[in-house]
Image (cartoon, grey):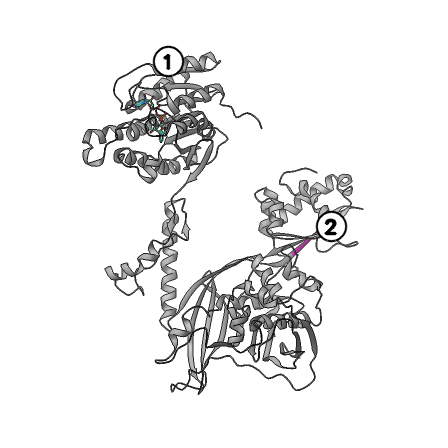
């Protein structure tokens, strides 16, 4: 790496007669900066004077550097800046380092102890920075370092005055960083811990030896360099380590149940544990972000309150990523043995997608008190007496992407009285950015808890549909693995019934049973392979009733009947002939028959303009101008450009024969390498803000065909790059 130099720069280091400041001054001087070595030369508590600064100046000069001593107090910091301007005609770097201590337990602290510390640390930093500001602004360059302390950030016994001053500098920095931003004035804070006369009686001797200021000086110098671009950082450094500290905020909590309720001391007390819960936090870089966040939270609260007024609701958040989708797909029998399943198992597959049944999971509320709390007086529900009877899911918006975050509302819409047992109809509404995108419904059977005089029939339940009487139109058979339930559990349903022999036997089963939702996942996979072009986003809704349990290792037979856009199905266990899923159906947007192993997604061409169009135009002109070079690549590339997860345009880069760049599929032959990437991501890759390797690893850039050939394209894609 090139040496980071400061030639032509003028640096002021306050309190540079010894300790940390001296190390900073020596380092900057040795790297070409002209240094104003300021030091009042007082003792540790600020009294008296000496000429430390001259010795440091001599040392810099002896090594061929340039420096001048300054003996002003930082309290008159303008004079120190004047020394820089008078001697060198400019100032580029200001390191506010000077400091003293007046430690006393608070009771004994005098007003003078307080004032003196504030004067040197806070007023001193103000005076120097203020005097340099106009020059920084005019030259559109400035690097300022404040010096804080862990005593300020975290508190330290006997240092109330010093802690207050050191924290004041962080607030000072925060605002200056905003005001300086557009003038390339960057303000950062160092939190050092080093052996100096300020710490000689605080640190243990062996530590004192090791904590050399020279280990911190490079951090401060780096943050003062022209190549440094961050601002408003608080960097703690000692012993050759550096860390960043910043403030975060808890997610907090509303202080009342409904926006129309009063806030009372008691409601505050009730919300308190959530107010101070730091298990999830947010970081803000700007004050406006704090307000925007709060307004969003309040709107969210109001939105929820409106919904909650119809039924008591349980809200939760659900996050998922490609790994979760793959784990789930394995749990429901997707296998690399079946090429059509690869799109559910391989995050870099060009059609990587979630299985539709995956999105039942955000609404699963077995562990929540949702059902228990809705039971009529005298009736109870817990995990020993509930059974998952039926399941429904409907996609209302776009099919969700391969990672995301949902807010889910669960509520019991009705409790039906079926005589001996009760059925709770649990609805889930799954929101993404406040938009309702998925609805699910579970029928939860509560054994032995009927007979309370409730309604027998439901007004809201989505019903099962009997299968047609004729022979099935398609049948798929697949054996489940002995480990199927063990694998499926990893998607979140940890009920011991599915893994623990004792629990299974106590519940009347010969061994742990497979999750009903796992069998459902198998069958819906079979349906979409046979009737939906293997395309999850083709599914509009599906419904099933769980009739009997399945044991891991048994073979499932999915029988399917197509009626218009609805595919009825039922699932049997081969070994017993039992129907285990009954009255089930999948509603499709389009029926695409028998393409179980198909991997080609329906890609719709659109002529609408995309951001990446200009990139391809540029590549086209580049290819035209350098036809021979382009030809030598010897390959055809196809780009599927996606928007919101759908391919909206294709581009072919024909870099062999007669090279050309054009919209659509290859005109001659077929693509050696196909790349699928969103319009935005491709533009980011070209601009260099998204690393193609990282994009590939994250599944943002999917490559099929010859992956090695993709690497040859790198230079072509770079904005401004030539062939
Ligand atoms: P030091 O005592 O060796 O250096 C401070 C220098 O500032 C001294 O040379 C002193 O003469 C000078 N000074 C004091 N008042 C001044 C004034 N009014 N005008 C001009 N110069 C003045 O101490 P050290 O440890 O090198 O401290 C440097 C900075 O780092 C201070 O701001 C201190 O608060 C801070 N700090 C140091 C820590 C450490 O572990 N050494 C821990 C946390 C913060």
Residue displayed at 46% across by 70% down? 366
For marks 2 and 1 on the same chain, the one whose residue lies earlier in the sequence: 1
Residue displayed at 42% across by 29% down? 143
Quadrant location of ligand 1? top left
Q: Which residue is mark 2?
A: 706
Q: Quadrant of the C terminus?
A: top right
Confirm if mark 1 falls within 8 A of ligand 1.
no
Residue 389 lies, with reference to residue 122, above or below; the image says below
Q: Quadrant of the N terminus?
A: top right
Q: Which residue is mark 1?
A: 54
Instruction: Tell me if mark 1 has few (under 14), some (14-19) or many (20+) residues whose alpha carbon lies within 10 angstroms of its own.
Output: some
Left or right placement of residue 320 versus residue 171 in this view: right
Residue displayed at 71% across by 66% down? 597
Residue 290, position as x, y percentages in the image: 37, 49
Which image quadrant is residue 642 in? Answer: bottom right
Residue 550 lies, with reference to residue 679, above or below; the image says below
Residue 45, position as x, y percentages in the image: 27, 24
Residue 458, position as x, y percentages in the image: 45, 83
Marks 2/1: CA distance?
Answer: 68 Å
Left or right placement of residue 125 versus residue 371 in this view: left
Closest to the observer: 599 or 526?
A: 526
Label 1 residue SS: helix
Label 2 residue SS: loop
Q: How many marks?
A: 2
Q: What segment carries the magenta color? A: 649-653
Which image quadrant is residue 302 in? Answer: bottom left
């Amino acid at each position: 790496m090139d040496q980071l130099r400061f030639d032509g720069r003028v640096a002021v280091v306050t309190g540079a007669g010894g300790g940390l400041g001296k190390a900073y001054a020596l380092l900057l001087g040795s790297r070409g900066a002209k240094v104003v070595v300021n030091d009042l030369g007082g003792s540790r508590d600020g009294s008296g004077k000496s000429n430390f600064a001259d010795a440091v100046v001599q040392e810099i000069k002896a090594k061929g550097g340039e420096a001048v001593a300054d003996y002003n107090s930082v309290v008159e910091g303008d004079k120190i800046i004047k020394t820089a301007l008078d001697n060198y005609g400019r100032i580029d770097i200001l390191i506010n380092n000077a400091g003293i201590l007046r430690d006393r337990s608070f009771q004994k602290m005098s007003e003078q102890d307080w004032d003196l510390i504030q004067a040197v640390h806070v007023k001193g930093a103000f005076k120097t920075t203020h005097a340099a500001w106009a020059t920084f602004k005019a030259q559109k360059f400035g690097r300022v370092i404040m010096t804080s302390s862990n005593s300020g950030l975290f508190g330290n016994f006997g240092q109330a005055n010093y802690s207050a001053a050191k924290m004041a500098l962080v607030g000072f920095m925060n605002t200056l960083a905003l005001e300086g931003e557009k003038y390339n004035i960057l303000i950062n804070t160092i939190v050092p811990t080093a052996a100096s006369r300020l710490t000689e009686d605080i640190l243990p001797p062996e530590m004192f030896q090791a904590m050399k200021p020279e280990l911190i000086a490079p951090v401060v110098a780096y943050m003062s360099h022209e190549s440094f671009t961050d601002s408003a950082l608080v960097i703690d450094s000692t012993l050759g380590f550096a860390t960043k500290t910043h403030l975060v905020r808890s997610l907090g909590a509303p202080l009342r149940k409904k926006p129309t309720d009063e806030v009372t001391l008691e409601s505050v007390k009730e919300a308190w544990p959530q107010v101070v819960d730091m298990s999830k936090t947010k970081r803000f870089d700007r004050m406006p972000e704090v307000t925007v966040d709060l307004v969003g939270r309040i709107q969210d609260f109001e939105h929820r309150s409106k919904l909650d007024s119809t039924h008591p609701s349980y809200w939760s958040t659900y996050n998922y990523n490609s790994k979760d989708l793959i784990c789930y797909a394995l749990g429901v029998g997707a296998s690399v043995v079946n090429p059509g399943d690869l799109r559910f198992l391989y995050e870099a597959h060009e059609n990587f997608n979630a299985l539709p049944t995956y999105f039942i999971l955000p609404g699963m509320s077995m562990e929540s008190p949702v059902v228990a709390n809705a039971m009529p007086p005298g009736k109870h529900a817990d995990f020993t007496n509930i059974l998952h009877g039926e399941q429904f899911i409907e996609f209302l918006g776009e099919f969700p992407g391969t990672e995301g975050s949902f807010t889910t509302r669960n509520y019991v819409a009705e409790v039906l009285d079926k005589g001996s047992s009760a059925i709770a109809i649990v609805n889930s509404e799954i929101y993404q950015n406040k938009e309702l995108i998925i609805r699910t419904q579970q029928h939860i059977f509560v054994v032995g808890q009927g007979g309370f005089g409730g309604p027998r029939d439901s007004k809201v339940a989505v019903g099962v549909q009997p299968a047609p009487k004729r022979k099935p139109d398609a049948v798929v058979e697949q054996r489940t693995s002995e480990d199927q339930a063990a694998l499926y559990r990893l998607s979140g349903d940890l009920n011991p019934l599915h893994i623990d022999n004792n629990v299974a036997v106590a519940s009347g089963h010969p061994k742990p049973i497979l999750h009903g939702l796992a069998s459902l996942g198998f069958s819906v996979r079979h349906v979409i392979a046979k009737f939906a072009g293997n395309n999850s986003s083709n599914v509009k809704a599906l419904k099933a009733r769980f009739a009997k349990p399945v044991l891991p290792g048994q073979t499932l037979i999915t029988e399917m009947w197509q009626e218009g856009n609805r595919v009825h199905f039922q699932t049997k266990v081969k070994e017993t002939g039992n129907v285990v899923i009954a009255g089930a159906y999948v509603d499709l947007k389009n029926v695409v028959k028998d393409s179980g192993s198909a991997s080609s997604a329906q890609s719709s061409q659109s002529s609408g303009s995309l951001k990446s169009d200009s990139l391809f135009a540029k590549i086209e002109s580049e290819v035209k101008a350098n036809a021979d070079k382009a030809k030598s690549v010897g390959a055809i590339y196809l780009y599927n450009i996606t928007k919101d997860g759908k391919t909206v345009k294709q581009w072919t880069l024909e870099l062999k024969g007669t090279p050309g760049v054009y919209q659509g599929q290859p005109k001659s032959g077929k693509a050696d390498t196909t790349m699928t990437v969103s319009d935005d991501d491709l533009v980011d890759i070209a601009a260099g803000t998204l690393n193609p390797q990282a994009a590939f690893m994250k599944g943002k850039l999917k490559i099929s065909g010859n992956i090695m050939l993709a690497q040859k394209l790198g230079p072509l894609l770079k904005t401004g790059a030539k062939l």
